[in-house]
Image (cartoon, coloured by chain):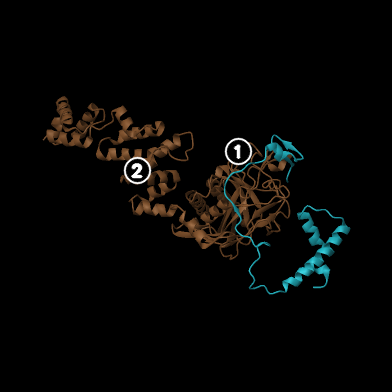
Chain colours: A brown, B cyan
Amino acid sequence: MSQYITTIGLEFHAELKTKTKIFCSCPTKFSDQPNTQTCPVCLGLPGVLPVLNKHAVELAVKAGLALNCQISPLNKFDRKNYFYPDLPKGYQVTQYPLPVCQKGYITVQDAAGQDKKVRINRIHLEEDAGKLVHSGDSIADSDYSLADYNRAAVPLIEIVSEPDMSSAEEAREFGEKLRLILAYAQVSDVKMEQGSLRCDVNISLRPREQQEFGVKVEIKNLNSFKAVYRAIQYEEQRQREMLDQGATIVQETRLWDEASGTTKAMRSKENAHDYRYFPEPDLPPVILSPEWIADIAASLPELPDAKTARLQKDLGLSAYDSRQIVASPAIACLFDQTAALTKEYKTLANWLLGDISRLLNNAEQEYEHIPLAAEDLAYLLEQVKSGAVNNNSAKVVLEEMFISGQKPADIIAAHGFAQISDASFLTEAVAAVIAANPQPAADYRAGKKQALGFLVGQVMKQTKGQANPAMVRDLLAKSLE
Amino acid sequence: MSDNKTIISAEDVDYVAKLAHLQFTSQEAADCTAKLASILNYMQELQKIDVTDVPITTHVLPLQNVFREDETGSCLSREAALANAPEQWEGYFKVPRII
């Protein structure tokens, strides 16, 4: 056991899934044409007034409810003042003393495999900044920067955890669960690589016998939960070595460098953290009535933990399969739609996690929805169950359905995949195989039961794999008695 | 509090001015310090009032829940957006290096 205790808190910024910005009607959708989605309000021109996007408020409340938070009935906005060229107004509109959501939690597993509640301190609603492009290799050696305000004032929620995590594993699980919950709740696109979900880490180490937290370091520039995991492991080791040598940790912001797998101190201006918050005078307060909050709660779909439990308990899937299905909202959606039409849950789970996942991975495009209709999938599962199509043929059908979008019945007919369960046809085939293979037939009669497998194989070969194998086995055994 | 000098120092004024990107001559800074001190002293008077049972004032007007629906409207053209930019490049606002 290490002589130090690691303390980790996480901060997330999630872009809300609204069509328009938080205080104006400019679109939020991504554009590669800089400064084409701006107006006097989001550019902070003099004399304009912001008007709050109602849907942004609803999505923030939805996120809070999904994350087990208490919702504040009284909401107001505040100005956070600082100068930076990505912030056109010279202040960010955010919520300081009265965040919309407080005191939530996510359950993760600790090192001993026990459930552990990691608390969420707060979620507040705010506006995003614009995007800066730097002329040099890094911000520090650029002669100038280029500002694009398309992203300025896109609605964000900031989610701040309590410093309740003590390992890279716990932090990664918390992050992955949070991402999945926001995805299921349809609050955000949660694409870390595209920046619609961003995660910063606060980490400190303290000697085991020490009560108070050590000096914390903030890590930014984390574009995946793999990066979060690696950065925490690196930073734990860096701080441990410093403390072992009696060195002092400085409170600072460090940037994760993916290529070298290290964190580096970020240069910053002095006094950068004195934001002089004050109430935003241009926005009246938002009162969230219990009825409104109840309506939003009613709009929440089934969340990941509840879905995992249901797949196990009600549909009899294994814990592992349930978790794997729930880990992909697209797969879980197709599972639920198909499971409403057929009871072949286990085979459905196998197909989704096996062949369909492989097809999705092989496809060079990203799918919002899996290009398979639930009724087609259910039809094919029923064909396999009734013995009309064998399992191997079904996989070929599945692949063609995925690629061409054709109906399974048409693909089965085109390939002649329909399984032969016609007893008189199979009896003939069985007789022909016995006649052509006297030695194995004699072996079987003499008690070498494994000879039957060879004969079944011969019948399958004769019928191009279309014979119903269970029937062939029965017919062979009877004929050889 | 009657002594204006103790409620806000010249250093405080200097610090806040720096955060706000303001520049003062030493005479202006001294004037400012005295004027801010008198305002703050006046506010001190208000601090004496017991407001335990008074609800927080979040806005000066009796308004609440003023919203817009999430519907897209028109934007400025890029040319219009950039019209007042001191410098621009390929559709971007060009700004001096930051750090």
**Same subunit, tags 1 and 2:** yes
Q: Relative to the observer, which residue lies in front, A214 or A343?
A: A343
Q: Relative to the observer, which residue lies in front, A112 or A419?
A: A419
Left or right of B9, for residue A411: left
From this viewpoint, is residue A445 visible? no
Q: Which residue is mark 1?
A: A31
Which picture quadrant has residue B14?
Answer: bottom right
Seen as rendered, the residue at the extreme right is B27
Question: In the rendered image of this protein, does residue A93 appear above or below residue A391?
Answer: below
Question: In the rendered image of this protein, does residue A168 appear above or below residue A142?
Answer: below
Q: Position of residue B24 (x, y in %)?
A: 84, 55
Residue type at numbered disc 1: Ser
Residue at left 69%, top 48%? A87
Seen as rendered, the residue at the extreme left is A481
Q: Quadrant of the C terminus of chain A?
A: top left
Q: Are marks 1 and 2 in contact (CB under 8 Å)?
A: no
Q: Position of residue A249 (x, y in %)?
A: 65, 56
Residue A461's disc number: none
Disc 1, SS: loop
Q: Position of residue A396 (x, y in %)?
A: 34, 32
Q: Position of residue A236 (x, y in %)?
A: 57, 53
Chain of residue at mark 2? A
Seen as rendered, the residue at the extreme front is B62
User: Which of the two discs, 1 and 2, labels the residue nearer the N terminus?
Assistant: 1
Residue at left 47%, top 49%? A184
Residue A348's disc number: 2
Q: Tell me if mark 1 has few (under 14), some (14-19) or many (20+) residues whose alpha carbon lies within 10 angstroms of its own.
A: few
Residue type at numbered disc 2: Leu
Left or right of A366, for residue B7: right
From this viewpoint, is residue A347 visible? yes
